[in-house]
Image (cartoon, rainbow, N blue to C red):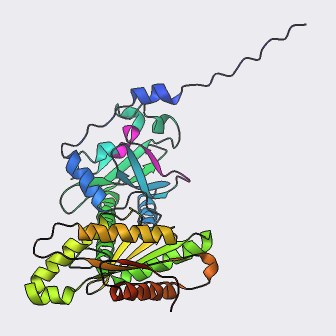
Amino acid sequence: MSSVPPVSPDPGPTIEPVLASAVQAELPVNEVARLAALNRYGVLDTPAEQAFDDITTVAAALCNVPIAVITLVDEHRQWFKAVVGLDGTTETPRSVAFCAHAILEPDQILEVPDALDDPRFARNPLVLGEPNIRFYAGAPLVSPDGQALGTLCVIDRVPRHLSPRERNALASLARQVVAQLELRHLVADLSLRSTTDVLTGAWNRRAFDQRLAAEWNRHARTRSPLGLLMIDVDHFKDFNDRFGHPTGDGALVQIVQSLLQPLRSNDFLARFGGEEFVAILPDADATGASEAAERVRAAVEGTAWTFHPLTVSIGAVAAQPEHGIDPHTLVAQADRALYRAKQAGRNRVHLFERWN
């Protein structure tokens, strides 16, 4: 008896033809500047934050809708900074984003009373499938320099209109989103300034302490070695006395550029104080630390100096997890090795092996 293969159920329309018939928004005429402004905030792909979550909660309640989203329109997607009513959804393609249309007119709210009656959205997959958008209203998030970053939008699964009071509330909350973005950016900028050396642009002592603690914890967890270089500019006091402190400041800037050149991208250089610098070398053993130190020393010696050649002395150390020391001891060992390098004649590297 022959068997008849079962007939597969009709899968219905697939996403591809729906996407093909969706009307994509044009790019704003200021798209390059808009993306630059968005990227300056450094907010894309960051974790949820209560301040933004609260705004979407209030927006949904004030407009009496099940869905509210803070969206940021990137080059190829709209990403959700905060969302109410769309569990697990963090982004959609920009090609189907209602918000990509909303940012084209930054000075007004885009309201779509019934998406099925709007030729821009009637064949949109977000309308024909989940989340089944019928009503949409998006208030553009406009930066102080006039760039539309995205929207605060409210969504319903049934047709409707916003009342004048709801429109005003949505616009007000959109301004609060931008205020939060500005505050977040300001805090990040202040944090960066507090951990950066003003003169040289290198990380400062505070940043070094934070990074060393973090690297030490990782080193202990992964049982990997950790290298450290203590670097001192040779005879820098004499240089300052001879050429003056402004010239000395310029030389320190040039020193940092020379120190960075041979270091790896994941190494961490900081100004430790005065003419002393320190470099954290993740996963570097004694051999790796010594070789890195020699590359640094040679780079400084080979620099084309503006006024007078400068050199550095370097103390190098590497810790293995089984040594049982702490990060403060690691710094002390590097400092002792630096002392030995200067004792031996300067412009050289000394690897810490023992205290005596």
State the residue at coordinates (55%, 71%).
Answer: 225
* Quadrant assignment for the N terminus: top right
Magenta part of the chain: 86-99
Residue 182 is at least partly visible in this image: no
Q: Is residue 332 above or below residue 77?
A: below
Most foreground residue, 239 or 267: 239
- Percent across and percent down for residue 282 are 48, 69
Which residue ends up furthest to the front in the rendered image? 344
- Percent across and percent down for residue 309 are 17, 75
Left or right for 340, reference 26: right
Which residue ends up furthest to the bottom in the rendered image? 356
Residue 240 is at least partly visible in this image: yes
Quadrant of residue 339 in the image?
bottom left
- Percent across and percent down for residue 265 are 38, 61
Most foreground residue, 218 or 232: 232
Quadrant of residue 43 in the image?
bottom left
Q: Is residue 325 magenta?
A: no
State the residue at coordinates (40%, 26%).
Answer: 21
